[in-house]
Amino acid sequence: MTKRIFVKRFFLTAINLLTISLFASIQLSASSPTSQTSPTQEDLKPDPLANENVSWSSESEWTPYEEYEIFKEAYPDVHFQFGYDREVEDWTLTVTAYGKKTVLYHAGGLYLPKKYLAEKSHYWRVIYNYQNQLADPADFTEEQKQRIIAYSSTENRQKGAVSSKFIFDAIHDCWTRASTESHLKSRTLWGRPTGIHADIVKPLDRVEERVYELAKTDPEVKAFLSQLLSCDAYNWREIRDSHTKSFHSFGIAIDVLPRGWGRKITYWGFEKQKGNEKWMLIPLKNRWMPPKPVIDAFEAEGFIWGGYWAIWDNMHFEYHPELIIAARRKAEKQAEELYKKQAEEKQNKRRNKKSAVK
């Protein structure tokens, strides 16, 4: 094996290992804001089990230009223009989609229209750390339990920050109900009727095809399809106790419900409504979940899964390719840094060995 081939294989192996370790790092964040509500009112937000070293409401490892590149890769059919407003002293991202042009200010990763710049504290970052690893409640400390309780409280939901959706309004032309519904497509997913935004038709088709293919050899996936009751996507409404609309209102979120879902544990909110104040401690084995290959099929096409959130929604998927891409790029960046570090250490050892010989 030549030295060049060895180095290449080492680098690829490091990327794979770091991708796994990146998503396995799940800790409680002291700075994460509010909660989600019903599955048809789901909201995207930083997770209170995210890495506590990063405040996703105010900090990011990505520069504004790097985020611009992430959006370009995530939404190739949308035109993005990167700029700078000297008067405001902030970076801008101009989004052109469906014949409409929208100028948004970076605002620390919030992507706000100019008139909302004074309300930065009301919103979370758009690109945050999506971690596709289940957090085992058996490992929660008492402090973590209390943070999750506070995070999911009605008071926090009413007063806390919400996800910034302006960039998604621009990308998908969902500023109004009328504009949103002009882009809706009626279709079936695994034989169940649903209404979705035109922007997710192709990726969802690929998810459907992949899962059908998996079902030919995977008994668990086959059982998932046979037990599926519904696939509900579009639903125009605001999140309860909040002043922001759900991603179901965009037609880019979908809930896959099994038959007899009312007798299964699928969503934290349902359990809390039943009076279970220790819902966050329900063992993973007792919660209904889509099979892991189904979740992976969704993620491969840019969908994130709500089951990984601290306030879990196991039926819920959202189309956010920017988060999948950001996670992949982070893993690649860390792999490259690790490779460089190990190469430097190896080189230093050689130098020290030569010096010792002399």
Image (cartoon, rainbow, N blue to C red):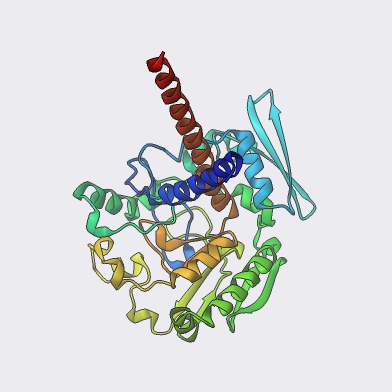
Spot occupied by residue 5 in the image (x, y as percentages of width and height): 59, 44
Q: Is 95 drawn above or below residue 252 in the view shown? A: above
Give the number of callouts.
0
Q: Is residue 238 left or right of residue 50?
A: right
Position above or below: 176 against 114: below
Nearest to the observer: residue 42 or residue 199 = 199
Q: Is 189 situated above or below 55?
A: below
Q: Residue furthest bottom?
A: 226
Left or right: 146 with respect to 318?
left
Tell whether 87 sits left or right of 216: right
Q: Quadrant of residue 311?
A: bottom left
Q: Nearer the viewer, residue 350 or 77?
A: 350
Residue at the spot x=43%, y=52% of the render? 20
Residue situated furthest right in the rendering: 99
Residue sitting nearer the eye, 203 or 272? 203
In the image shown, does 268 or 203 lie closer to the viewer?
A: 203
Counting from the top left corner in percent of width and height, residue 105 is at 63, 36
Toward which corner of the image does residue 54 lie, by quadrant? Answer: top left
Q: Is residue 60 visible?
A: no
What is the x, y in percent for residue 223?
A: 45, 84
Q: Residue at x 74, y 54 (%)?
A: 77
Q: Residue at x 41, y 38 (%)?
A: 55
Residue placed furthest toward the top: 358
Image location (x, y in percent) of residue 141: 21, 50
Instruction: Tell me if residue 311 can be seen.
Output: yes
| Residue sitting at the far left | 142
Quarter of the picture containing the C terminus is top left
